[in-house]
Image (cartoon, rainbow, N blue to C red):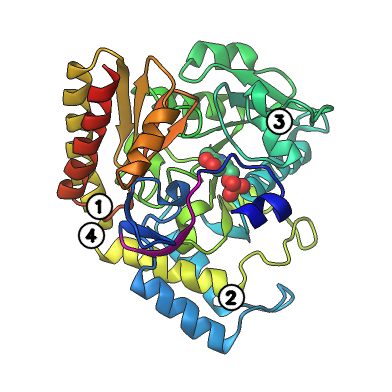
Amino acid sequence: MKLSEEYVAQTYARYPLLLVRGKGTRVWDLEGKEYLDFVSGLAVCNLGHCHPKVVKAIQDQAEKLIHVSNFYYIEPQIQLATLLCKHSFADKVFFCNSGAEANEGAIKLARKYAKERRGEDRYEIITMEHSFHGRTLATLTATAQEKYHKGYAPLVPGFKYIPFNDVGALKKAIDSKTCAVMLEPIQGEGGVNCPSKGYLRALREICDEEGLLLILDEVQVGMGRTGKLFAYEHEGVEPDLLTLAKSLAGGVPIGALLIRDEVAESFEPGDHASTFGGNPLATAAGVAALTAILDEGMLENCQKVGEYFLSRLEEIKKKYPFVQQVRGRGLILGMELKMEGSSIVKEMMRKGFLINCTMGNVLRFLPPLIVTQEEVDQMLEALEEVFKGVS
Ligand SMILES: Cc1ncc(COP(=O)(O)O)c(C=O)c1O
């Protein structure tokens, strides 16, 4: 930890914890202490840690071919793109290495598509307050939270912010420059904020009427986190562009931009690229991860345990007046407190449970999709012990 402070750039406020091993829902530190993981590497380890099929796919692929250029066809890349298209609205996939990069690709493609069809001045993208889209300069600008902008001006032109869940605000914000609307179907970093019923459908209808693209950022909520493979499926609407990353390859870095054919045509050879994007190792892991999510009942478990977990959180809320609200869907759940949550996270860690806090006061629970009701009970029992010390 001392060497980390000396040699690693100090961009993270880290907990004094060094994790060295993981299996399923559990991780272990250097001293062998076990933790039940309700963070999952921030919605990355949806299959649990070191899922055997992902480990095997990485091992097998590493022995065959780790990397080649996108000058050539890549077998597991083709397999993963095919699988993603078969199980979603999409016709084409562009691969990259992170969520920010996937969103960067979506922003570039939306601009290019709109400029080609409606003129050079169609470049503005409307995004939502409390959103989070990444840390590159364009995605940071798309992220409508001032705290992330500080120190980085001038930001990228061409973004406009409106409140989440406000259809009227979107109608007012659209003008002759607008090319797309971009949002997370559930805001993760912004505090686990869910769309009200019919909101996404209304957005889809407005986009269709106005000729705008609908971009969904499912970097955090995609790949089964909400109990369906993609969160948009709950609302019965389809986007034009959708971004994925985090859990797509079971823990190996990857990003993907899923695209409808008509929009994908605006990307021609040479328009966009990534050296590592769709690399054999990452996409082989992705094929194994996606197959495991679909074949091993993880979506069903996520729905069942998620409903139980939310009902237990609601019971707890009734007992402690400092709990403001509980919300979420599947296994992305939030508990908003009337006070800061960081001391609760630390106390839970001492007891052997990893949980997260976002926006300063929203406890966020993101366990692997294989978590059991018994494990949820164990964690909540510890949480209540901590809460009793507070009240
Ligand atoms: C919704 C959403 N979009 C984009 C990102 C950025 O992803 P990455 O950190 O892989 O660039 C995140 C990361 O937390 C996210 O939650």
Mark 1 vs mark 3, foreground winner is: 1
Is residue 20 rendered magenta in the image? yes
Mark 4 vs mark 1, foreground winner is: 1
Q: Position of residue 273 (x, y in %)?
A: 74, 60
The residue at the point 75 percent across, 56 percent down is 272
Badge 2 residue CB within 8 Å of ligand 1: no
Nearer the observer, 103 or 125? 103
CA gap, disc 3 to disc 4? 38 Å
Q: Amino acid at mark 2?
A: Pro
CA gap, disc 1 to disc 2? 30 Å
Mark 3 or mark 4: which comes first in sequence? 3
Q: Amino acid at mark 1?
A: Val
The reply, left or right, for residue 57 in relation to residue 123 is left
Mark 3 or mark 2: which comes first in sequence? 3
The residue tagged 4 is 297
The residue tagged 1 is 371
Residue 318 appears anywhere in the view: yes
Q: Position of residue 238 (x, y in %)?
A: 45, 40
Helix, strand or loop status at disc 3: helix
CA gap, disc 4 to disc 1? 12 Å
